[in-house]
Image (cartoon, rainbow, N blue to C red):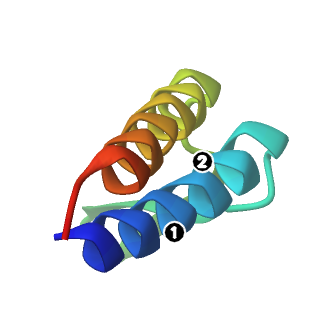
Amino acid sequence: MRMPALILGVILLIVGGLIAAGVFKYEDKNKAEIGPVALTVTREKTPPVNLGWVLIGVGAVAMVVGAASKK
């Protein structure tokens, strides 16, 4: 139980830090067709910064639990 919690904690800390820094981006595409005319709108979005902070907190808790657990 010790190693998986530590590994999960490190992964969550890294991903949460990258999300909080605004590194991850994704595209949102909307398409509308009216007769022969087709319109497409593409927006570049980032995940909410709060999600990054939550992942950082959960990762820290997972690392503390992994470090404090016995073999």
Q: Residue at x 58, y 27 (%)?
A: 53
| Residue drawn at point x = 56 percent, y = 38 percent | 56
Q: Which quarter of the rendering shows the N terminus?
A: bottom left
Q: Give how far across and how far down residue 62 sits, in percent.
A: 36, 46
Cα gap from disc 2 to disc 1, whole angstroms: 8 Å
- Near mark 1 (Cα within 10 A), the count class, few <14, some 14-19 or many ≥20, is some
**Which quarter of the figure has residue 2?**
bottom left
The number of numbered discs placed on residues in the rendered structure image is 2
Q: Is residue 17 above or below residue 57?
A: below
At x 35%, y 45%, the residue is 68
Q: Is residue 47 above or below residue 23?
A: above
Q: Which residue, given by chain and number where applicable, does mark 1 sit on?
A: 11
Residue at 59 percent of width and 60 percent of height: 15
Which amino acid is tagged 1? Ile
- SS type, badge 1: helix
Q: Position of residue 58 (x, y in %)?
A: 39, 36
Labelled disc at residue 69: none
Q: How far across and down, in percent of the image, does residue 9 sit?
A: 45, 58
In the image, what residue type sits under mark 2?
Gly
Left or right of residue 8: residue 10: right
- Which residue is situated farthest in the front direction here? 70
Disc sitting over residue 16 in the figure? 2
Q: Is residue 23 visible?
A: yes
Q: Horizontal and vertical percent for residue 30?
A: 39, 57
Q: Is residue 37 above or below residue 9?
A: below
Q: Quadrant of residue 8?
A: bottom left
* In this rendering, position of residue 33 left or right of residue 61: left
Disc with the residue nearer the chain's start (2 vs 1): 1
